[in-house]
Image (cartoon, rainbow, N blue to C red):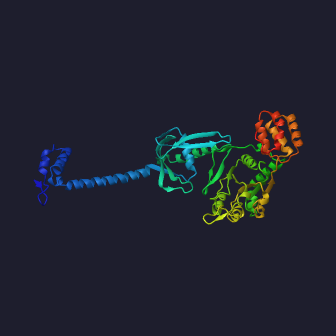
Amino acid sequence: MSQTSGNGVGAIDLEKIQKNSDGSITGVAKSAFNEVVVNNPYFAAGGGLMLLGTTLAVARHGIVKSSGFFYRQLLVDLEIPSKDKSYLWFLEWMSRYKHRSSRHLSVETNYVQHDNGAITTKFSLVPGPGKHLIKYQGAYMLINRERSGKLIDMTNGSPFETVTLTTLYRDRFLFQSLLDEAKKLALKAQEGKTVLFTSWGPEWRPFGQPRKKRMFGSVILDEGVGEAILNDVKDFMESGDWYHRRGIPYRRGYLLYGPPGSGKTSYIQALAGELDYNICILNLSENNLTDDRLNHLMNHIPERSILLLEDVDAAFNKREQSKEKGFTSGVTFSGLLNALDGVTSAEECITFMTTNHPDKLDPALMRPGRVDFKVFINNATEYQVRKMFLRFYEDEHELCDQFTRKYRDLGISDVSTAQLQGLFIYNKRNPQGAVDMVETLRRPSTVF
């Protein structure tokens, strides 16, 4: 007995299937497959192939769906964009991590030219764009660093990047541990050092490598001057509640003025080291700096940082108007005043300004709320001469007396501490030589 389709094509002979099988279920199935698929002219004509293709397509779609489902259930991703502060922390951490497999590396060159003309170059190999594999605390993580070819950071022209970490869902808690470890590594590199920040577009970025903290006692101002500034800053830092209870803006401005080479900027560096603060240097004469960008930068100063505005008297002296570019200086005087003491000015801010010509400053800049503490840093006094000599040549009190007498006999009062330091450095192991060369202080342009 056989069963045949309506048009007689593709007949299925059940008796033949039973006859060709060995009676077992497997044998019947095999015989039926040969009869239906292999020996069936309808299947061979294409209908069966179409059915098989459809079945495979459905199966493939099911596999894709199920793999996506299992991916979401078993794996977890962490994305770190290049705009995030932890991005550089992670790359630095991974560049030092030993248990990693990387086939794509990028080089970061640190180039430093010293004052004496010497050049120091350091190369760091960091994970480049591509896939990397690490084993962290027993868990495997796939690292994928991707660079966007379409999106560009307008502040520096570099393409946006993302780093994606993938691991098993059960190990997701390791992400927090890894980021904490990367942060500690970055902060340890800055421990005991002062970080200098400069403006880069709308944000602050570290300038060069962190500097070793300058000892507070290494900058010698006139008697009691340095200590008075330090005590005032510390009192301000401890008075936050006092300001807030009285509704007074919690900020304080300092102006250090005096002749060049008297130690104004050096003192600020030493003060930052004493307070364990960093320094944000802002150049008001920068052509691309505008009132809006100035206000934005001053409201986004990194924590525990001193804002330094050097030579504020020169910021508005060369404001020339042209038809093509407008003003050569993008910051207006009113914009500076509003940034220092306006409605949108920053809170919890310590600002230091320096100038060699305080007479050129507008009185509006000097009023309290913008400049709260003014200090005159003059040329070297006899007190500073003695202190500096004994700092360079410890326990040489007799030679210090000789040097001081000779200095007094010169009858000059315009010797800067920078001149004295230059003389002592030239004779760094020869205190008698410094005494013999005291006459050179008469000529500020002396080249040793």
User: Which quadrant would residue 427 be assigned to in this image?
Assistant: top right
Q: Nearer the viewer, residue 339 or 185?
A: 339
- Left or right, 21 with reference to 364: left
Q: Residue at x 80, y 54 (%)?
A: 375
Residue 75 placed where, x, y %?
Answer: 45, 49
Q: Give the total of numbered labels.
A: 0
Horizontal arrangement in the rendering, residue 369 relative to residue 155 (left or right): right
> Which x, y percent locates residue 319?
68, 62
Name the residue located 10 percent from the left edge and 53 percent from the top edge: 1
Q: Residue 19's x, y, as percent?
A: 12, 46
Q: Is residue 159 left or right of residue 227?
A: left
The quadrant of the rendering that contains the C terminus is top right
Judging depth in this view, the residue of 283 and 373 nearest the camera is 283
Determine whether 153 is above or below 179 in the image: below
Q: Nearer the viewer, residue 406 or 69?
A: 406
Quadrant in the picture for residue 96: top right
The residue furthest left is 1
Place of residue 10 in the rendered image (x, y in percent of width and height, measured from the top left):
14, 55
Question: Going 69% across and 50% down the picture, which residue do you hit?
Answer: 279
